[in-house]
Image: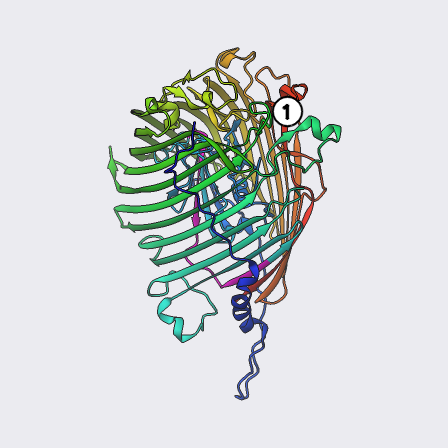
Amino acid sequence: MKPTQDRPPIRQRPCWPLWAAAPMLAALAAPVLAQAPVADSGETAPVAQLKPVEVKAHYDNGVGSSDAASQGVVDGSRLTDLPLLRPGEVLETVPGLVVTQHSGDGKANQYFLRGYNLDHGTDLASFLDGVPLNMPTHAHGQGYTDLNLLIPELVDTITYTKGPYDAEIGDFGSAGSAHIRYRDTLDHGMANVTVGAYGYRRLLIADSFLPGQAAKGRPDAGQVSEAAGGPRLLYALELEKADGPWALPEDLRKYNGLLRLSDGSKANGWSLDALAYGAHWNSTDQVPLSLIQSGQLCRFCALDPTDGGNTHREILAGEWHSHEADRYTRLSAYAQHYQLQLWSDFRFYEDNPVTMDQFSQWEDRNMLGGQAVQGWFHRLAGRESMTEVGVQLRHDHIRVGLLNTQARQTLSTVDDARVSETLLGAYAQNTTWWSSWFRSLLGLRMDRVNMNQTSLVLPQNTGGASALKLQPKMSLIFGPWARTEFFVNAGRGIHSNDARGVIDKVDPTSLSVAGSAGPTAAQAVPALVSSRGSELGLRTEWIPGLQSSLAFWRLDSDSELVYSADADIGSTSPNGASHRYGLEWNNSWVAEPWLLLDANMAWTHARYARMNDNGALGDAIPNAVSKVFSWAATARQGPWSAGLNWRYIGPYPLTQDGSQTAPSALVTNFRLRNQITPAVGWSLEVLNLFNRAYYDIAYNQDYQTSPSLSTLNPNGITVHPGEPRQLRLSLNISF
């Protein structure tokens, strides 16, 4: 097949080098590094005093704060003390959620939650200030969620749920959801410069101010509060480069910018956002474990040195909210343009011994959407009650394709399609306080998806599909008694499937293999797949200073979406129905006014619903992590603060019969901060403190490591090593 000629090129946008921002940084730093003269008034210049520091809990998970034991809110201050290897690890503040990587750092992370290998985001609904980040019918994987556009210093809160119990959450929310919200204002401007091992460099400049006072100087030292009159403007610019420990330098170049104009308060106000993000990188994907063990390949080497990718996105978003004594309203809308191109090679020489098996997944996407929510406070059967209704609309117009490539040069077009996908969601839910110790939350959600595809390679794959699902939700909350409350939760959820998997009549990848015998029929999948979840839980503050929650849950899915590491498209594919149940125990303890301790445990039992399903023996779900433990300690004393955290991932099966398993992984990170003056501070991060050798991810797959058939391994293991110990030092300037 010949390449399609009218495919729009994927543009690589150059990132600004860090030195280009040096003049800006110097200008911002000058007022705080230089000592201003004191007027001859007979007065002594005031001496700046550091305020005493007192640790507070990072989680707003107290009694009465949520409708399930597994729901909660993470305060953005948690990220101040959390060492981060990658931006996406902000989600590891959600108890039981693990974030890793199997490729270059410009690619979306791997996520693990409640025994799901969520690949790059499937079944974890993620939002940034109301804008959905999951991408349906994505070039690489259904629900792809790239969090590399996050700026951790700007995060105000992360509101998370687990299980399909919240009527406001629709597609991709079966296992959980995370709403990340940025700050409207900053307490002070910041200019942070970070240098680290393996060529790591990062610059962040951010501030907020009243535009009308910009010409009058900054008498408030940069502090802009909600009480200040008039709109507030927040800006941020982040530039980053890194090579990583890889033998093939990653050469990551990233730019990230934000402008936010807002006015009002959290009760009544509005905001307008403009975001721009871009990155390009080389990647060392997973490689055969046997080659590392035999010494034929170094631990951080690649088999195909031309893998990598580039991406960029631009977002415009706005929201308006109003809260009155008897009602509230929230309106939001967004527009996004997104591009991605990935070059990957997971099987090396198996399908195409001459040119290797590299392929390219690319897409160009425009997305429009919005939400309208109305709530009322009223009485029901003589009891206090609240009813909320909402409508959500999202439309994605996508050009998506798959290419056979060699060293990033196109050999042939496997697939090229225009996809139009619209998702409409509507819900209603009611909360009623029946007594001082019992309240109920009942909801009903409807989601309808319409898909249309025009295939530019195989006309028989042109067509359309639609589906509608109803999802009832229920939460019963009892208590509190002795500062302890109990929860009963149940509900249905959904995830959508890739439109190509729903509509295709012919599998386009069956024609891309050397020596192919011809096209094979595609296995059709439903447009929407249901899940059913239930949970029993409790939350207590019976011990002063300790917030603790316990949840026993179950989650069944009609179809498992799994990452196909050895597929021609390296994407998600549908497998059989699954059952999961598990136990979560989360604790946050203010042990002393200066010391905070967190300890979280998650255990999961995950199995396919039918033995020997999917054409394989056994019922184990590959890459379903069964044990996750995390511990963290945060200490603050005067100008000093320190954070130490551990993350443990237990062994997990790589094959359905359980004959192969991935080893456990334990990683320790440390961060030390010191505020030299109110305007100048520094921080030191030590990532992988004990330099443990571990794997971010492991897969069972077939591969061939050279043109010789003797190197064919039909049942091998490939791994992506975790990064070794590295130090990062930051200079933080406030203005």
**Magenta part of the chain:** 174-193
Count of number-bearing discs? 1
Residue at x 65% of width, y 19% of height: 709
Q: Position of residue 483 (x, y in %)?
A: 48, 38
Q: Position of residue 422 (x, y in %)?
A: 30, 34
Secondary structure beneath dot 1 equals: loop
Residue at horizontal 53 percent and vertical 86 percent from the top:
39
Tell me the residue that label 1 is attached to: 707
Taking depth in this image into account, of 557 and 303 the one nearest to the observer is 303
Residue 148: % across, % down: 50, 45
Instruction: Provide residue 691's location: percent of width, then percent of height.
Output: 72, 41
The residue that appears at 37% across and 35% down in the rendered structure is 169
Three-letter amino acid code of the residue under disc 1: Pro
Residue 586, quarter of the rendered image:
top right
Q: Image height check: is 34 above or below 510?
A: below
Residue drawn at (55%, 53%) of the image: 240
Residue 486 higher or lower than 44, as above or below: above
Q: Nearer the viewer, residue 346 or 642?
A: 346
For this rendering, which residue is in front, 298 or 179? 298
Does the magenta portion include 180? yes
**Residue 519 in view here:** yes
- Crowd tier of the residue under label 1, counting other residues whose Cα lies within 10 Å: few below 14, some 14–19, many 20 or above: some
